[in-house]
Amino acid sequence: PLALLGNQPEQITQIQSQTASKGGFTAAFIGDVNNIGIHNAALLVEEVQKQGVDFIVLGGDLVRFGTEDRFIHSLYIFSGFIKDVPLLVVPGNHDLYPDSTIFERLFGRKRFAFVLKDCLVMIVDTGKGVLTQDEYDWIENTLKDNAGVKNRLLFSHRPLINWDNPETKKDLPDESLYEPLRQMLGRNKVDYV
């Protein structure tokens, strides 16, 4: 079952194979699984699989502290509940601390994109708490490279902008960061963020 969990090309191939004969696809997004406890998260994944989804996106924070022993414990629990639905893993801030290389070694890429049924699916890394310039550029280039794709989905753990305005210390968007991103996503007709 653990072969279905991760961000390696094998999981993408599995998703593409499972949907090849279908007219479309269905996906589920489950965020911050460590907040409900790993056992409950595994039960939720099991229940969602029964709904007939083609893949699940785990929206980050699989663990509270990204050490190898905590990931191994979580993977052990998940292994009893994963049936035949691939699970992609968005990196969360808790997953990447103290060492992001553990996440990469266990799950693969922290950001990636693939086309499924004329839909661009993008997973981005917001584990640092904000959308970095590198991530912004990657999103923009990926959208440009896939301009002919009909639909676009963008998954991240944290919001793509930091809603904490350092000047006012209130939860207000910093328009200087938000507006270029909003324009870029609108210009490229991103359907879901």
Image (cartoon, grey):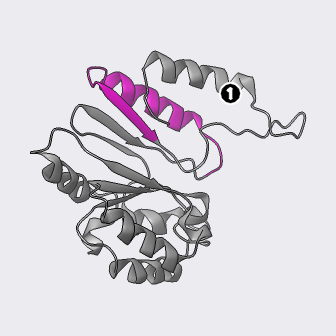
Q: Residue at x 57, y 76 (%)?
A: 37
Task: In this rendered view, identify the residue nearer to me: 96 or 3.
Answer: 3
Q: Residue furthest left?
A: 21
Q: Residue furthest front?
A: 51
> Relative to 162, is 135 on the left or the right?
left
Q: Residue at x 52, y 80 (%)?
A: 70
Which amino acid lies under the numbered mark 1 shown in the image of this protein?
Leu
Is 165 above or below relative to 56?
above
- Dot 1 lies on which element? helix
- Image coords of residue 81 (percent x, y): 34, 77
- Image coords of residue 42 (percent x, y): 43, 74
Q: Residue at x 26, y 58 (%)?
A: 52
Q: Is residue 129 magenta?
A: yes
Task: In this rendered view, identify the residue nearer to me: 71 or 15.
Answer: 15
Task: In this rendered view, identify the residue nearer to me: 141 or 164.
Answer: 164
Task: In this rendered view, identify the residue nearer to me: 162 or 18.
Answer: 18
What's the magenta region? 128-154
Q: Is residue 122 magenta?
A: no
Specify few, some or many for label 1: CA neighbours under 10 Å numbering under 14, 14-19, or 20 or more: some
Residue tagged 1: 177
